[in-house]
Image (cartoon, helix red, strand yellow):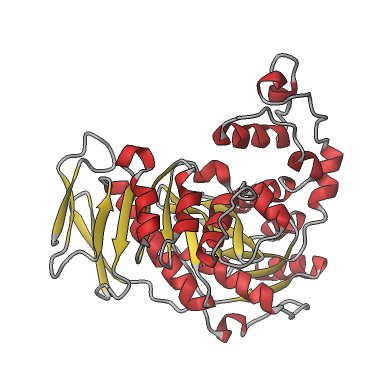
Amino acid sequence: MKELALKYGCNPNQKPSRIYMEEGELPIEVLGGRPGYINFLDALNGWQLVRELKAATGLPAATSFKHVSPAGAAVGLPMSDTLRKIYFVDDITEPLSPIATAYARARGADRMSSYGDFIALSDTCDKATALLIKREVSDGVIAPDFTPEALEILREKRKGTYNILKVNPDYRPEPIERKQVYGVTFEQGRNEIDLTGDELFANIPTANKTFSEAARRDLMIALITLKYTQSNSVCYAKDGQAIGIGAGQQSRIHCTRLAGNKADIWWLRQHPKVMNLPFVPGIRRADRDNTIDIYISEDYNDVLADGAWQQFFTECPEPLTIEEKKAWIAQNTEVALGSDAFFPFGDNIERAHKSGVQYVAQAGGSVRDDHVIATCDKYGIAMAFTGIRLFHH
């Protein structure tokens, strides 16, 4: 197929709309549904991300995309019982394959942002992964292949309208890419920068110069994730997955705060009080997610006030106090932080430290690099200047 007509573009008034190849055939096949313009943007960006993560780590990878930025990204490392519970997959009887585990991690890191996601998988979608996808609110999935069982499960989702894309894993795009804005054509070389080499850690200006193997892996995951995230962007990563992504902010400190707050929520969801919330039987998954998010926030009375808690809980839980939250967040350690460009001031490091960051990879090159380095040294943080900028628009 050389081209595919779409219902409309980004918005219903933007017609006509299509995707097409000037030469050759489209590298994707629609196996189900009718994907739209934004679906394809998410799918193709997400596919590049997981393909690169798989090549970099050797592990199956998955991402959960929303509005052309990842809400989560992960590789298929085993999950603890705690993660299985907070990702709501502890009730799955089907053994979770590495690719299913990667998706559970990618979706579970920021379930609020992942609501209605487009999924990208580096490996064949199997039955276990399809069962996870089936029960989530999602727009579609792209993968290099699907097992017959997985395809049957996914084709039943959303009354048969769920978007299922099969991508040719051998496809390689032309080295020059183009797009139009206001009738003007922009042209540039594709961003083929390699983020796997030891040269990423060749320039370590901090007193602490030690990066564990896990830290190097997590920083690589963070940087590859940022490569496909709308700039400005910052990514916190731990244990083989992104745990907080701040995308599309004009100010870098706002990226760092946004991503840090998401990382804190990810960690707070593992607090015993949160894990043992007495939900009413049969509560919808989205309502449970929203309730947890509010319970953790400063607006906890919205779900704990008399007349409100009865909608969500069998009994009124105790609030999670500010002191309890601070004490719990202080226990989070070994977090890695990547930035798609340099940190202009040390305030970014101050904020990152509050969320357990001990490893940083950023471009370097600010006139205040000395202040950033000094702030890292203040907390014993190891930081690498990669010399690589990863803006994506």
Q: Residue 22: give x, y in percent of width and height.
A: 13, 65
Residue 215 left/right relative to 121: right
Is residue 248 visible in the rendered structure shown here? no
Considering depth in this image, is 351 or 4 the residue closer to the camera?
4
Number of labels in the image equals 0
Residue 195 left/right relative to 188: right
Considering depth in this image, is 275 or 348 the residue closer to the camera?
275
Quarter assignment of residue 161: top left
Considering depth in this image, is 262 or 92 the residue closer to the camera?
92
Quarter assignment of residue 230: bottom left
Residue at point 35%, 43% (across, down): 156
Considering depth in this image, is 252 or 86 the residue closer to the camera?
86
Q: Residue 145: give x, y in percent of width and height.
A: 35, 65
Q: Quadrant of the N terminus?
A: bottom left
For this orientation, the residue located farthest to the top is 307
Q: Residue 214: give x, y in percent of width and height.
A: 68, 74
Residue at point 24%, 66% (across, down): 27
